[in-house]
Image (tube, rainbow, N blue to C red):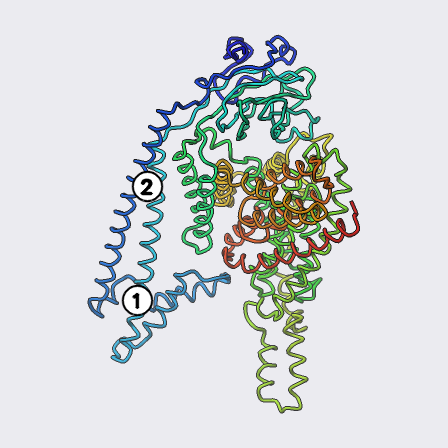
Amino acid sequence: MASLDNTFMRSASPQFSDDGDDSGMATLPIGDVSSYPQSTTHTYNPQRANYLPEKEKDYLKGRNTCAFWILVILLIILTIGNLALTLTIVGILRLGRGMQFMELVPEADTLARNMDARGSSGAMVVESTEMDVLTEEAIKSTGSHEGDDEAKPAAGDAPRASRLYLVGLHVKIAFLTICWVYFVWMLLVNGEKEVQFVGLTVPMDGREVQISSEPFVLLLNGPFHQDAERMGGYYLFVSAGTNGSGDVWRVPVVRDLEKSPPHTLRQSFIPPEGGVIRLWTNMSSGIFIRMGVDLAVFDEVHGVVYATLILIILYALIIWDVVHRTFAAILMSTLAIGVLAMLGDRPTAQEVISWIDYETILLLFSMMIFVSVMSETGIFDYAAVRTFQLTNGRIWPLIHGLCFVTLAISAFLDNVTTILLMTPITIRLCELMKLKPAPVLMAIVVHANIGGTATPVGDPPNVIITSNHFIATNGVTFLTFTSHMATGVIFVVVQTLLQLRMLFRDVNTLRMAVPEDIEKLKRELHIAPATEQPQLRRQLKKLSTRGIVNRDEYMRTLQELESLYSIRNKPLLIKSTICLAFIIILFFVQSIPSIHSISVAWVALLGMLLLLILHNVSNMEEILAKVEWATLLFFAAMFILMECLSRLGLIRWIGVQTERLILAVPSHYQLAMAIIIILWVSALVSAFVDSIPVTTMMVRIVVAMAQNPKLTLPLQPLVWALAFGPCLGGNGTLVGASANVVCAALAQQRGHIITFRAFLRFGFPLMLGSVLVTTGYLLLAHVVFSWH
């Protein structure tokens, strides 16, 4: 058996550089591939991979065990110290009633002024935080009876509330300190993993490489790209076992090798007896790649457990508002890197940075600046006044109109762009009509996610699905996708609107204050004789459920609004309209596969730059101050966290369990079960985990099931189930979709808080209802009537 020293080349040729993981492929001529040896079977030298002898494994195991117990001791010391400090403070507060005048709680008059200021600002808080509750209790408890002995027992409530707050504060600080100590220690004692890469020529007829009979992670560096699926259908195939007998890893390859920068991909393998992997390609000229093998693989079960715990902690921090969601994402992403380091898989800094999806960050950044400049024209205020006029000031026509406009726009534009355009108008309308903005904003963001489901370009999961070469070449065209998905979206929209009407049966719950005419009717109902009460009740129900306003008040408000809000800068409006038209046109153009040469993020950046040029911006600091930097940091941290969870094996584990469930069902029920499992698993997981890695994982499962001769499942119903799941699942939680986070950030910028719990109570029931309706639609269309 020949050695790979003859074929795994290090950088002897000036055409190939081995300085890093991302070097060496750009200048390699494809014609030179045939000059490399074409042996059939080769032996991979484990010492040139990340091979660990048994003694070194035992050493690492002992070092990690020692680190673990040191960490446990530190955690115990920190916990005891924190409890001692908390008990000391509580004991001090119990020494006497005079301690209530300590400056732990502001004075009553200061609290009252703060509450009045907050109430008069027009800001609506969806759900009070713990401090708000404590503050209101402190106001009530202190009262105005400072010298009255009878009031003294009640005055003790303020220190009691302060003690609870202090206990919670110290518990939070202790917990976060524990997390900090943990990942600091893990990063100190575990270095970055570096895997040796070697060159390898893969011919069309394939080659086999002897590696190891132990589980390993295979790393490939070459002309691979996520958009290569739509660029010609060339692949590199990798299988564990001789003659491709194991599961096949299909890696899309860019056609023009000389112009493609190299990318590094990784995949876990459990080889059969003999430890042989086989590589082959469908490119007639072959392909040159660089390959690395990591034999220091941790137990995937342990990785899944750690990933689940990290995810639970993240959502606990966000749900109970322990810290800001951006800070929580940064903490948990760093903690996840610490867990990877503990398991011997610490990534390099360059690798961590590469996990951030800069396309999404650039799109958000560009559209935030664009919308902020466009708002200077007054167009959003003007559009709000005209919408108020068209709906005659009625609440439900207004909400339905906003939802339908959002649906139409999000079907063809990115959801984030749609929300960036619709949120300022919605908030202004709510302020004009004295409505609580948060419920209306949540309604439009739910419809934005639903509308994006209808077309291949409306939502990122749909782009991932339709970009798959196997799916695109097996009957899933733009027209086919839109016809099947749009039909289901119609049913989902009807269900969502009906559920919204049931959720807000009393439209007064949407108002900031109950109108005077309704209050007057309620007073009359209390004193009216029994014969007149039925008629008064009917009038009250009509006003409460339909949201009808007094005609005289409506006309007076409309005249006042028309005099106050008009277009302030018409030249800038014309420039903004030109730039917006440019962006929308290029959004449509870039979605055509044959001329796909510019991404959505680049389109948004070019449109934003054109607007700044035409506007002749001189104060750049003022423009940058309007960017939601916390939102951009949140997305960056979440991208890193999701990649860490994927490295820990959580995403793969979910996919494997899904596939096993479907295969365990009798054959005549497999289509129905596959639709149900794919739809519900992808929806529920996408409500809590970013939809992009979930969709990427589920696409592989769908394609594998469609190609499995034992199942004989049709492809299209599985594709529709997968497309509906992540898009609708994003409505379940605040962090389930990018549009949700952007909407909450824009609302907070204008003083309206949308908390995680408020969105969960609003969106999760709607998500369950929409997925349930979609399940019925897919089963009826494809199991009963076989539309596919």
Q: Which residue is mark 2?
A: 181
The answer to which of 376 and 478 lies nearer the viewer is: 478
Residue drawn at x 57%, y 60% is: 762
Residue 474 horizontal/vertical position (percent): 75, 35
Q: Measured from the top left, where is residue 492 in percent x and y? A: 69, 55
In which quadrant is the C terminus drawn?
top right
Cβ atoms under marks 2 and 1 closer than 8 Å: no
Position of residue 458 measured from the top left corner of the image (x, y, whole percent): 67, 44
Q: Earlier in the sequence, mark 2 or mark 1?
A: 1
Q: Nearer the viewer, mark 2 or mark 1?
A: 2
State the residue position of label 1: 160
Can residue 410 be seen by looking at this rendering? no
Front one among 593 and 114: 593
Left or right of 682: which side holds 751? left
The amino acid marked with disc number 1 is Arg
Callout 1: SS: helix
